[in-house]
């Protein structure tokens, strides 16, 4: 009647690109600042701590928690409607479609673990603030390093491929030429972010 | 002594009824130049004997025009959804595997029930209203550029290849699929059909409409009529977004 499906799908698309995209970019930038050494990263984190608490919590709840929960729960519903078939139809975009869903399936448990351990348990319950030293010691466990690197790469792929599908879903990129240009550009963006991710993860491990 | 007759091996996924379990049987068909899958199925029908020498019920399938216009003989040939009539044996890897397009309910063997697409066409109002109390005059003028696009989309023969290839069409989803969705654009382009464009766009906004498209773009790869389905899906995405804004701000 009121086309609820339509508005939920479009909201899912908007939230993923604009809201969660900003969250991912913030994570890449903050972690990349670790390449400049402990002081560079800690001063950046200290600047975030200067945001008054009510505003900070408001941002966390309305800018991250609620959008993320909506995107994840509705996303699971969407992913369950797909019968991934890249084995039968191994075209490029079909692989991207499948990877978009596989990365999502990895990200759901990964983000539950990431948020519960670092945000709710470490920072919230134990009261340990985020710092270079905390992450540096956290990333001494090779399993954690591998799972976190995969988590970051999955999120970045999901976001960058999401830019392409956003342009299709919103009718911005209509023809095949512009669609492949957008696709190539977003994958270049993914490669750039992936390199940065590998660099700062290696930096945590090696230094 | 005549040269030994060359044979073509067919591995066919069969099923006795809608709820029966599928099984496979193999048949050899005499090769001849220009042999296509429908012609081979006709040979099997004349002489339904498997490679083991067992006489079985002939394989059921559907075909009609035999020139890639009606869409009836769509089946899965070597894993890909396509028309059996234009699938030349010379261009296929052997043995040739045939299976029904299981996105649709299977009636028997390779025969499927594609009436779901007809229901979807009714849902998106895939027609132009011409009957009324008004006087019928000359046909309205068509923009020749628009007509070229309309001509392309009008080639759609509702064969269902795009639905079979689409990962978002199937029992797990209520997506009506690329073919019926893009037909809405065809009728929205028509000089008289466009009067009902808001109706069609609203229908596409409903459950299982265009929002269920996940951009896997398999449809445009498999379309036997080379219809630029993804281009028109993107155009329809634009149109439904505009319609949604009208729905929100005009009332």
Image: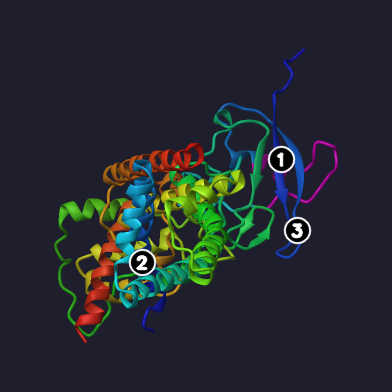
Q: Secondary structure at mark 1?
A: strand
- Disc 1 and disc 2: Cα gap in Å? 48 Å
Q: Residue at x 29, y 65 (%)?
A: B187
Q: Position of residue B56 (x, y in %)?
A: 81, 48
The residue at which mark 1 appears reads as B11
Of labels 1 and 2, the one closer to you: 2
Circle 2 packing at 10 Å, graded few (<14), some (14-19), many (20+), is: some
Circle 3 packing at 10 Å, graded few (<14), some (14-19), many (20+), is: some
Q: Are marks 1 and 3 in contact (CB under 8 Å)?
A: no
Question: Please, what is the dominant secondary structure of the magenta stretch?
Answer: loop
Mark on residue A15?
Answer: 2
Chain of the residue that carries numbered disc 3 in the rendered image: B
Circle 1 packing at 10 Å, graded few (<14), some (14-19), many (20+), is: some
Q: Is residue B174 within the magenta segment?
A: no
The residue at which mark 3 appears reads as B16
Magenta segment boundaries in residue numbering: B41-60
| Residue B173 as seen in the image, left or right of residue B228 | right
Query: Can the viewer see residue B174?
Result: no
Query: Can the viewer see residue A124?
Result: yes
Q: Position of residue B135 (x, y in %)?
A: 17, 80
Q: Quadrant of the C terminus of chain B?
A: bottom left
Q: Are marks 1 and 2 in contact (CB under 8 Å)?
A: no
Mark on residue A72?
Answer: none
């Amino acid at each position: 009647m009121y086309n609820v499906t339509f508005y939920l799908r479009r909201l899912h698309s908007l939230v993923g690109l604009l809201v969660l995209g900003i969250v991912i970019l913030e994570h890449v930038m903050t972690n990349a600042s670790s390449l400049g050494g402990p002081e560079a990263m800690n001063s950046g984190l200290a600047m975030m701590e200067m945001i008054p608490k009510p505003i900070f919590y408001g941002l966390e709840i309305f800018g991250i928690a609620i959008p993320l929960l909506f995107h994840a729960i509705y996303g699971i519903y969407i992913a369950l409607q797909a019968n991934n078939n890249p084995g039968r139809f191994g075209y490029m975009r079909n692989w991207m479609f499948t990877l978009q869903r596989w990365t999502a399936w990895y990200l759901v448990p990964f983000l539950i673990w990431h948020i519960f351990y670092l945000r709710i348990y470490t920072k919230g319950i134990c009261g340990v603030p985020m710092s270079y030293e905390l992450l540096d010691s956290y990333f001494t466990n090779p399993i954690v390093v591998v799972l976190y690197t995969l988590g970051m790469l999955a999120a970045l792929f999901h976001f960058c491929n999401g830019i392409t599908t956003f342009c299709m879903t919103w009718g911005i990129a209509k023809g095949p030429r512009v669609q492949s240009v957008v696709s190539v550009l977003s994958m270049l963006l993914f490669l750039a972010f992936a390199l940065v991710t590998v660099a700062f993860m290696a930096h945590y491990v090696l230094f | 002594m005549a040269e030994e007759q060359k044979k073509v091996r067919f591995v066919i996924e069969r099923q006795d009824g809608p709820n029966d379990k599928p099984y496979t049987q193999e048949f050899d068909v005499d090769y001849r130049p220009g042999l296509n899958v429908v012609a081979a199925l006709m040979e099997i029908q004349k002489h339904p004997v498997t490679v083991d020498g067992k006489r079985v019920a002939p394989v059921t399938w559907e075909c009609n025009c035999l020139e890639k216009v009606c869409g009836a003989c769509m089946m899965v040939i070597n894993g890909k959804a396509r028309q059996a009539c234009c699938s030349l044996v010379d261009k296929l890897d052997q043995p040739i595997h045939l299976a029904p397009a299981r996105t649709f309910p299977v009636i028997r063997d390779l025969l499927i029930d594609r009436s779901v697409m007809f229901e979807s066409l009714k849902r998106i109002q895939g027609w132009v209203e011409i009957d009324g109390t008004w006087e019928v005059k000359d046909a309205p003028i068509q923009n020749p550029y628009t007509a070229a696009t309309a001509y392309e989309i009008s080639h759609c023969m509702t064969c269902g290849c795009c639905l079979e290839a689409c990962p978002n069409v199937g029992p797990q989803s209520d997506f009506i699929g690329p073919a019926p969705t893009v037909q809405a654009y065809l009728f929205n382009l028509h000089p008289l059909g466009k009067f009902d464009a808001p109706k069609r766009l609203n229908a596409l906004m409903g459950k299982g409409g265009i929002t269920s498209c996940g951009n896997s773009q398999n449809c445009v790869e498999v379309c036997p009529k080379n219809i630029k389905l993804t281009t028109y899906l993107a155009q329809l995405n634009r149109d439904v977004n505009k319609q949604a804004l009208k729905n929100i701000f005009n009332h």
